[in-house]
Image: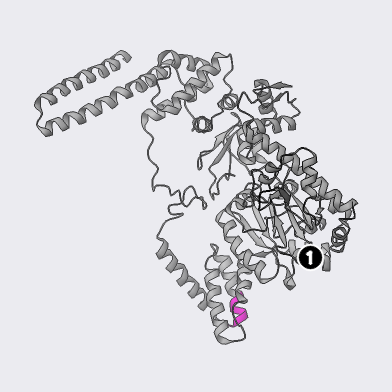
Amino acid sequence: MTVGRIPEEAIEAVLRHHDIVETVGRHVHLTKNGKYMKGLCPFHSEKTPSFTVTPEKQIFYCYGCGKGGNAIHFVMEMEGYSFPEAVRVMAEEAHVPVTWEPSQQTGEQTAEQKDRQILLEAHEYAAKFYHYLLLNTEFGRGANQYLRDRGMSDKLINQFMLGYAPDRWDTLVNFLQKRGYDLALMEKGGLVSAKSDGSGYVDRFRDRIMFPIWDKDGKVIAFAGRVLGDAQPKYLNSSDSMLFHKSSTLYNLHQARPSIRKSRTVVLFEGYMDVIKAWSAGVRNGVASMGTAFTDDHVERIRRNADEVIVCYDGDDAGQAAAMKTIPMFEKAGLKVKVAAIPGRKDPDEYISEYGPQSFLREVIDSPLTVTKFRLLFLRKSHKLLEEEGRKNYVLEGVRIIAELDSATEREFYLRELSGEFGISLDTLKQDCHDILLSRQKVRGGGDNNDNSWNNGRNESRRAPKSMPAVSVHHQIERRLLYWMMHDTEAAEFVFDKLGDAFNVEDHAALAAYLYAYYSQGNDPEVSRFVASLRDERLERTAASILSMDIIPPYDNEVLEAYVTEVLKQPRLRELDERREEWIRAERSGDVVRAAVIASEIIALERQLKGRQDDRV
């Protein structure tokens, strides 16, 4: 196995095997639109498709967020891989031999990456060690019996690698130390804790059932430990580390992802046991957060894999309140949301144990409530409906919830329910709802999606201007030149001879330089392959943007000559504008001599520009 750069032939083989439409289609519903495929961007939430795939060129580009590139870049963005990681994963999928490994000399392996690899290895050992202690030692007997009593089978315990940390201070410390692991690094990774007096290290987890937590690739990156007795906290997670971040990690995503992507739906639970018991009941698209507040990072992880979320939190007041906080986050990100309500204030684990898996699937997962219905049911708990005042306030607040709906049909459906239940005229409820809508319109002002950045509910800090600034003519000319150059070797040679790297836009000059080097190596004009050679995110996006322009007419040498001339004129035109401004300032200040000198310079510049124009004619 060689060390260093990934062979170009390996990158080419990966791109040949992974068709852009098929690669993107795993995550985005694409529809044909002329020679393009269009869909909703997976990298930012939007209501109107601005994401395009061009099969002919094997590239994607989003006009909303500006992300673009080939199949490798798409996988990098979706999975959070580096370029080498994406190529390696895609090569293995395509059965392309991986004949290279990262090189320190190329900067592909850093000290941090080495520490990361050591910690991943240590976590894997720790998971197997805890699992062994649970199933095969006297230490784990009580924990093993507890799991059996909770309905955990051998298959589930093995599937989720459940384990046990004994009630001792140094079980894992000794295990890791004997295998040569640096305990200071293990402490940074959250596996052990430093003693308060600095004299050494102790186990972080003691007398707890251990739940390994995996990353998206199925590598153990952390643990959650559930106490067996009454100690607090009930659950203890690993601390944040270079491997693990509670605010963005979803439990069981690595196993659930195939089912999530197939159904485009994720079921969100609160706890580890809920996910595991639901898995045993046939819910293979279930995940859970790490026992912490749900975050925008969690939402983003889900949005990249699913279009719909079924929130299945505990049926008690705390669980329902948590669902009420989580729902708006999904709605803001453009995801469809439903709520799988569990009766009797039970959690999913308890419901499955008491009523069985079939009842859980039929009555809970397959019969979710709409968000509006759930909000109305939640609202009922805060009003005394046996009292007139309570009923009145509930109806008034319920109408406000219903007024949030975009669909007039949906609004009428729920208003009819209120009307029938409380004996209030439907027309009266409609009038109240209409008044609420009018008052909100006055507050918001007219127009659709005001100030929203590409319909992106998550981009409120990036308000778009009311009208997009016009792109200058010379900027468009340079983009067209590069478009032709990326498709035609002769066009690139012509521009190289006449213009070189004298583009006025920095990124355009850099792209041209890469193109000249690309063709000098004997490469053919394959745009996807060229984009893969850039290895610079900004230039990749610029190239993808240029390649995604509307149909560009064919060129000839006369058109190329005219465009090159326009590009070369720009520095002189800028200089001419600056001189004219200086002349005006000199005139206004009464500096006659200075004004005369500048006027002569202006005349000379104008003659030079006219000479260039005459040469073209």
Quadrant of the image occupied by residue 103: top right
Q: Nearer the viewer, residue 39 or 91?
A: 91
Above or below, 17 relative to 445: above
Residue 496 image position (x, y, % from top left):
45, 15
Give the colouring mode of the picture: one colour
Is the magenta region chiefly helix, strand or loop? helix
Q: Which residue is mark 1?
A: 229
Q: Is residue 95 left or right of residue 501?
A: right
The segment highlighted magenta reads 417-423
Residue 463 image position (x, y, % from top left):
43, 49
Task: Pick the quarter of the image with the C terminus.
Answer: top left
Q: How many marks?
A: 1
Query: Which residue is found at the position 47% from the left and 24% from the top?
Result: 510
Q: Is residue 576 left or right of residue 105?
A: left
- Residue 615 in view: yes
Mark 1 Cα within 10 Å, few/some/many (few <14, many 20+)?
few
Residue type, mark 1 in image: Gly
Query: Which residue is found at the position 55% from the left and 69% from the top?
Result: 402
Quadrant of the image occupied by residue 267: bottom right
Residue 481 image position (x, y, % from top left):
45, 23
Mark 1 lies on a secondary structure that is loop
Above or below, 65 relative to 590: below
Task: Pick the quarter of the image with the N terminus.
Answer: top right
Quadrant of the image occupied by residue 343: bottom right
- Residue 366 in view: no
Residue 142 image position (x, y, % from top left):
87, 60
Q: Nearer the viewer, residue 435 or 493?
A: 493
Q: Is residue 588 part of the magenta span, yes or no? A: no
Q: Nearer the viewer, residue 434 or 516?
A: 516
Q: Is residue 316 left or right of residue 209?
A: left
